[in-house]
Amino acid sequence: MAQTLYSKTPSVVVMDNRGLNVRTVQYYRHPDTVDFTDERISFSQYTLAGFPERIFSPRQYDLWKRDNSIKPDRASIQSLSGMALQTEGTDDGVAAALNDIAGRPVISVDAMGVKRRYLYEENHLAGRLLSITEQAPDQEFSVVERFVWSGNGEQEKAYNLVGTCVSRYDTAGREECQSVSLLGSPLRITRQLLPDDIEADWQGNTPNDWNTLFSGNVSGNSFTTCMTADVTGALLIQTDAMGNQLRYEYDRAGQLKSHWLTPAQGKEKNIIASLTYSAAGQTLTQKDGNGILTTNLYEQKTQRLSESRVERPSDHPSGATILQNFHYKYDPVGNVVSVYDHAQAVRYWRNQKISPENQYTYDSFYQLVSATGREMSTLSGSISSLPSPLIPVSNGDDVHTNYIRRYTYDRGNNLTQIQHNAPGSRNNHATSLTVSSRNNRAVLSAFTTDPEQVDTWFDAGGHQTSLLPGQKLTYNQRGELSQVTPVSRDTEMDEEWYRYNEDSQRLVKVSQYLNGNTQRKARTVYLPGLELRTMFRGNTLNEELHIITAGHVRLLHWVSGQPAEIEGDQLRYSYSNFTGSSAMEVDEAGKVISQEEYYPYGGTSIWTVRNQTEAAYKFHRYSGKERDATGLYYYGLRYYQPWAGRWLSADPGGIIDGLNMFSMVHNNPVNGVDSDGGASLMSNVITLIGGIFNNGFSLPSFSRPSFSWPSFSLPSFSRPSFSFDFDFSFDFSPVGVVKKIAGPAIKFVYKKAYKKLLNYALSKAKTEQQKRNIIRGFRGVSVGVGVAVAIAGVVSSAGLAIPVAVGVVAAGGAIAGAVGVFAGPISRSLSKAYAKLFRGRTAAHLSTATGNFMAGGSAGSAAVAHGVTSVNDPVLKRQGRTGEYRSLAGAEVGIASGTVSAVLNDDLVKSGIAASAAAMGSQVSESQKTLEGVGDVAATAAIEGASAGRKLAKAFGLRSLTARAVETVAEVATNVDISPASLIENSSTAIYAHGKTFLHVRTEDTNNFEAFRNIEETLPADGDAGWLSGALENVWGWFSWSRNQNQESFA
């Protein structure tokens, strides 16, 4: 029988005697040639200390076997402690860094030869970062960043600023934090921009010296954003720099319920009237302020989106109609194979049936190899230009035609050709790319067809230096695209240039171009929730537009130059497809402004609008990102070329998203989403330190855990499928019946005995430290047992002698158990390394993944922990915490989530509670030393709280057999435990975890909890802090009562 596409295509991992991945074998198969299988081998080498030294992708490995002078995809040199001293990548060049004795970066040199020096406070102080200087080759040093830290005065205390970074001078200007909440959330931020013709160089010793760069006008070009948050830190009100106000309302679960927008000097508008959610937190319905209703349906077993319908309901003033109705079909692993829009009509033209449907085909690596759909019949083979829209929407049969696109990739997963065929309109063309023979750099074949010449179109850091032939690209010292020159002339040139803040987020865009004989200049300033756009014709201001952004809604307010065809303060509601691309815009009356369809890798296939003027004001398109005049899409950390299906420059995060640093979402644009140009969503959580096989760590799977023993699960190298399939089959043979009966019985006895023993051990503990040690021990047992059982399943089929098999299982379990016990120190040490290797949130998420993994957490608890870190890390950043602190905080969050998952058999709710408690601890901690161990504290307190909650529920009669039977039926029906007993248990868990973590951190910081309990005396006279003292008294009373009551078992 002929083999199928996916049969016999496993991923085989070969490990050395240290457990490090030295080979990975994968089997590639294309759907057009299923009888041919391409074996691809990745190869890794390590130092004697076990640190990664060289990593080869299959493509580079094949070249290296023939010529050992070929360089690996990634090579690195580490210090004795494992810190990276030098890294060399074929895609992004050579970089080096040196750290001080505390592990802080002191000097670094990137591939472009730019040197950076870091200056810190003196040793008797906290050692916080004070400045960063840069020096490009053959240039003087310039001070590109300065940090000003708050003192301990009365004014700083009044605004909760003590110990925070209150002012930061960066490459775009200055950002000042003027107030923060008790939880550390910023409440007032002022951003001041440098003049367009001045580059940042903050020379001098005082702010007065630095402020001279603002051309003597310190208050000019300054924008202030104010926020109001509730006691949980959730945003309630945001007032932007122009006085426009956004207001948010949440339900009891903390999910957004409704949303309002109030323009400056205008009336409040309800932009989201209501939202409803499923038990899994997925959006079911959304009623917008324009009366449009969005309804989402999900597959019962997999929880994948099956239908998304956007409609004007029967009571809508503009009349009932379905505007958009996407139906989705998937393959078994979760790849979308078909999308059908039932709101659109089937048309017939030139013997074609033109359906509003897209179909997708994948290879065995889940790379997209073909896509079908419809496009405008007037399209040509233009590469980068935006097609002219259809105006107005036509009902003729000749406006659309079918197309098919086929994609070809090399063995390095580089997209090498896009073949486009539209027989009805004869729009047949191919886009070919030439890939370098030494790395993954590639350019359009219009540049060159010689692989040896490709590198001449890139700089040493992997930045493409020409957009299209004749269009120059310029980068700043940080590798950020600073200028594009689409048209070069002897006099005035057409150009677009950009300015970024310290996190590489774009703040200013300026476009200059010649229109006839008149020079036109468009300037955009990006602020929180606001875009300020101005247009000059010569030296005359021709148009000033403010765009207020509130989620999927944008309000266009013209200060001057409003077009006659557009009403003032126009509201635009954007409705997206499954990849987040803007598919339809609807106005405040519920009438369609524009509709747009896209090719898989970007590019517009269909675009219809009401009128040409409104079309000019659609700025966000594919993936919801802004399309610049150059045709590039700006994602945040870098720019994307939709005509080439690849990034313009190498990944600034290194190999965090794979060894190919130019590949767009692993060549799966239908299912993958990259929110910022860093790591794609498909691998954002499961990627630990780059690529799949880059060091000794295995990657957890996203699949829902079904293992009922301690919830440590072996890693999986398959892409996440998010499947929730159930097996209702039953083996009626005697052996099968015994397995079905004995298996659950053994698991039941194990779980009961395990919890009894855990509770007994905790009851004998006399100190909090003893309790934490007990939890660490049980965590080690959980990890060890989980690994031992998994190894047993492998060796049982390996034909080993029983003594050998038992020895292998015991050794594996013992080693894993030791890792579980010492998960904290291991994870914290690695978090420091991540902070040196990667920027900001990347290091935090890597540390989170490591902490959860080392603590024995499941894939579910990993996802929960990453969700908490996604919220917590920006808060820590606003507090001015160092990168090492933020990375450590990520590790503590992962440890907390993973520990509770391992000890409580993958209870994801309690894992989330413990993770959030650890995050809270990181926000209120005053030092990195205090932060260390917070994850263990939060996990231990959460487990204690769960026990107390169960006892309380039992005291109320909520744990009786009848009550539990009713709960079981409800849980089976809803897939969520929503019983009163569960609510009490989770509430107790939250109170214990957050309260004890808060107590631990503040006790460590102040060494005097009695003084902290009277904290309201140190707050401003006009601050309402009485609630805090009362809440602490209540929590303290709860702890005392629970300790006296909690002497029975953890049933």
Image (cartoon, grey):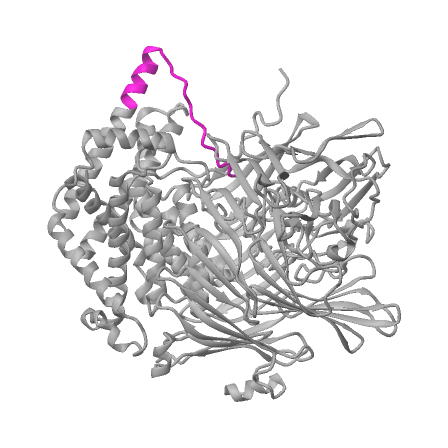
Residue 1032: x and y in percent read 22, 63
Residue 393: x and y in percent read 76, 44
Q: Visible in this render: residue 631?
A: no
Q: Could you tell me which quadrant the C terminus lies in?
A: top left
In the foreground, 585 or 978: 585
Residue 984: x and y in percent read 24, 45
Residue 656: x and y in percent read 54, 52
Left or right of 107 on screen, residue 1042: left
Vertical side of 236 occupied by 354: above or below: above
Magenta highlight on residue 145:
no
Q: Residue at x 84, y 38 (%)?
A: 428
Q: Could you tell me which quadrant the N terminus lies in?
A: top right
Vertical side of 740 occupied by 1018: above or below: below
Q: Visible in this render: residue 721?
A: yes
In the foreground, 464 or 260: 260
Magenta highlight on residue 731:
yes
> What's drawn in magenta, residue-wise?
720-743
Vertical side of 251 occupied by 27: above or below: above
Q: How many marks?
A: 0
Left or right of 945 on screen, residue 188: right
Vertical side of 39 occupied by 741: above or below: above
Q: Determine the image quadrant of residue 19.
A: top left
Looking at this rendering, what residue extends furthest in the top direction? 733
In the foreground, 696 or 840: 840
